[in-house]
Image (tube, coloured by chain):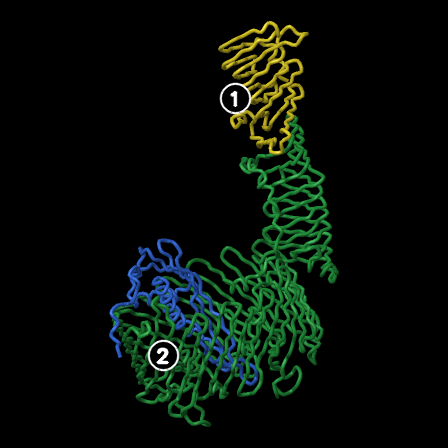
Chain colours: A blue, B green, C yellow
Amino acid sequence: CGFQLRGDYQLPESLESIRLQSNVSKELASQMEQRLVHSGINVSKNSSYQLALLSDKLERRTLSLFESGQVAEYELLYQVSYQLLKDNQVIVERTAEVARDYQDDPNFALAKTREREMLVNEMRAEASRIILQQIVSELSQ
Amino acid sequence: TPQNSVSQPLVCQVTPVESIADKSLQLQAIQAGAIGVESQSARILSNDKAYFEGNVIIQHNGQWLSTQAATLDQQKGQIEASNGINFSDGYLNVSGESLFLDLNSNEARLYSSDYRLTNVNARGHAELLYLSQQNVLLQDSSFTTCPGETPAWQLRAERIEIDENSDFGEAWHARFELFDVPILYLPYFNFPISDARKTGFLYPTFDSSSSNGFEVEVPYYWNIAPNMDATIAPIYMSERGTMFSGEYRYLFEESAGQLNLEYLNNDRAIATEESRYLWHVQHKTQFNEQLSLYLDGTQISDDNYLNDFGSDFAGRADTHLYRVAQLDYINENWTAQVRTEDYEILGDYLSPYRTLPQISLSYEQNKFTGFSTNLYTELTYFQNQDKASNYATRAHVEPSVKYRYEKPAFDTEAELSYLFTRYRQQSDDARLDDDVTRALPRLRLQAQLHLERETSDGYRQTLSPQIQYLYVPYENQQNIGIYDTALLQDDYYGLFRSRRFSGLDRIAEANQVTYGLTTSLFTDSEREVLRASLGQIYNIEDSRTELLIDETNEPTFTSSNSEWVADINWTMTDEWSLKSSIQYDTELNSTRKSQTALEYRKNSSNLVQVSHRKATNILNNDIEQIGTQAVFAASKQWQVAANVFYDLTHDRVNDAMVGVQYSNCCWAVRVSAYRRINRDLEPAFNNATINADTEFDNGISIQFIISGLASDNRGLIDMLEKSTYGYRRPFYLSN
Amino acid sequence: QGKADFKKPMEVESSHEQFDIKNNKLVLTDNVVIRQGTLLIKADRLEASASESGEQADTFIAEGSPATYTQTLENGNDISAQANKITYFQVEQRLELSGDARISQGTSSSSGDTIVYDLAAQTISASSSDADNGRVITIFTPKTKDDKTDNENR
């Protein structure tokens, strides 16, 4: 059906290396660096491109209610705002958002907190994928 | 483009004030500190008075004056002008009777003048206008942001003071007038001029609801210091009494935080007329690059508090309040944390465990290809909140080594971890041993292939099959208590996880293969318009690990082979998008869990979202709910917003809110109606049975928003965010 | 103010000199310079004439593009003026500048179509011609710490 192995990482030619600067969570920075490296981009100090992770935000919203009217499922919304600079000129400024839902269980409050923390790390990996996707798309305009 | 012009707040058409500066090019160029005068004629006595007549224009340090006649006293550095003046200093434009300007102290007194603030589009009249460095004092004055002879609203006050850098104005002996009809007298009253300091300052708000009756809130803002402020708001509720609500915020070099207190003395709506309160503390200190401290805690007087009064710190329908105090140390490879966590459970549930404290230390090599090693260690002391005799100490060490090999066409990863945990437990549950050690290895092998092709209609399609083998030997853990562990919900994102329980008290054995497939469509500009995934876990042996098996029910399999999981994210056009995920059990051919959301979004002021959720067996409840959320800007003035959530299993409206906002350039009125579930979790308060059949609380809220004063021009979106489903609780992210 | 200069000897330089006996007028032309004490007048053409009663010349009309007049008064104030035509009435102690006139005294300087400067009372009266675009511009520069260094920004 016409599929063949991917030849290269489908990156715009100019983007072989990038400098990553993050004044936000270390975990997000390491997930982002991992995504960049796994996509064939060399993360190095002296590159004309710089990805600056500006801020990340986690919020929780009610998705559904039990008969008692209390929360049955929550939705976690994780937002990362970032800038892509070329020779210190901002060329992209966007926000990537990831959503995950999880069930609430008041009988195991501590366990649900640990689940929320685990989900945040998974959302950071997904946010990194989305950020790279948005950058590649902006540079291929 | 027209769409987003609708969402922009309207700004009143301001008759442009003719700038004095434009009339004199020469005076624009004089040096700082000099006084430039242009006139028909001038008589200057050396080092004494100077008289100017005929279209006189004076400029000094950016202050411009134009009049027919003016006198300048060179010795005292004072200017006087009468019979008609125009004055402007970039912040304020004034036309009045007469003026006295002291050039040394830069203070001006203008008599019976009409003024206009340039950046805030506010104007009015003042018998005396006293202007100093950044402070404007108006005596016997009026203030409005509305155009026209009889402005929609106007504030008349004996004294109004506007401080440019505190962004707040104060008024003494103020009368609030609507179309020249005085409706409110306030001895003292302050108002935000811009939203730099206090965003979303709704002012004043009038609500009425079946549970609180008629409600009026008039907040007072107190600008204690440049880095400290307080808001004090008496809230009168006809059914309950008057609640005091106070907020204090501070911002220092390294730390920032806020304290909140809400207190209602004997609530008339309750049989026992108890007092109701909420306090909230939030504080963060960043000692240096690595070390930071964070505290966050909320306490409420009773389980119904959130339901009855709502709060900025917790959702109305929340089942618990989370309190935490933590110290974080983070550097290149190490992350250390000491924290204690505590819960206030709302409603009748198991008493939770607290961590008193939990100490964790993790090392990451941050090497993403080839070999890399990580280490996670944790030491936690758990104590049950109500049964203090149940406590446990748990030590956990988890080294892991990973190898990753990668090419554009495929990547593969192997990870071997060793999970060593030691418990010392004290519990009244006989099954738990005092001293337990558990050590389990975990092997994870994962590979992914990357295929792609060009589709007929010009998209680049990728196809990524992914397979993972996970092995963890079985160990009976029924002698370990449940402290921070629960079964994780399995959706597509959980397929490739290496654990099926959260926390550490249960490590499920696994001998399973997970296979999944993800495909994406990219436009020629590499924008991902469609992403769909499908996957399943195949257990070579069934997993028997469970939380706590009690004799009553037979062991349940916590992972079935027949469940398929799919997820789709499709941006059909710039405006239409679809998001859906489903968990389907082929054996029982029933949908374990599904969620679908279709959205039409023209811009942030015109969007419609329809969603459907179905989930079986959450705390042995089945959930099926549909919801819709819509915001529609009919015109620049009219905005409508609504969200309705209907519960199909219990055949009732769980939550509904409809709001209409009419806004013109200087005021807005927002009328909203809501219907929500009235939870009653405190049997002692009113009726004995908890929530025999659900009651509802209906209410109407009318908010009169003075735009230009309280800058609530975010439209109706933040109204929806006050509803049960809309409210977003922020969480702190430490590392 | 400024009277002391008039007791001092007056030096006059010019390229040409012409004496009009009938009208009792002395006319000097081509870079005329008059110096008397701290008073200094430069002009292209100068007419010195005496009123009927006086025997010594007491009215000077200097024209130039522009003609200039500078003097330092007893109180240390410098005056410097320029205009197309400067008329100096020694007896009335009055200076009349007309045509793109400019004068600065102490910390103030003015410009306009016609300026009258009363040396005795030290007052400047400036006015612009009837045409409404004629304007009088007066600039008061800030008092620097010591007035002496003030004259370099004239």
Q: Nearer the viewer, residue B58 or A2?
A: A2
Residue under mark 2: which chain is it in? B
Q: Position of residue B596 (x, y in %)?
A: 45, 80
Q: Give the image quarter of residue C3.
A: top right
Mark 1 closeness class: few <14, some 14–19, many ≥20 residues within 10 Å = some
Residue B221 percent across, percent down from the top left = 63, 59
Q: Residues within 10 Å of mark 2 (few under 14, many from 20)?
A: many
Residue B625 got which mark? none
Decide if residue A78 is on the left or right side of residue B460. right
Callout 1 amino acid = Ser
Residue indicated by mark 2 = B533
Task: Judge whether B95 appears above or below A53 on screen.
Answer: above
Q: Image point 28% across, 74% down: which residue?
A: B453
- Quadrant position of residue A21: bottom left
Residue B717 position in % (x across, y down): 55, 69
Q: CA distance from mark 2 to mark 1?
A: 90 Å
Secondary structure under tag 1 reads strand
Secondary structure under the numbered disc 2 in the rendered image: strand
User: Is any part of residue B263 visible from this angle?
Assistant: yes
* Chain hosting mark 1: C
User: Where is residue B441 shown, x and y percent of the image?
Assistant: 31, 79
The disc labelled 2 sits on which kind of residue?
Ser
As drawn, B231 above or below A112: above
Residue, disc 1? C65
Closer to the camera in the image, A32 or A83:
A83
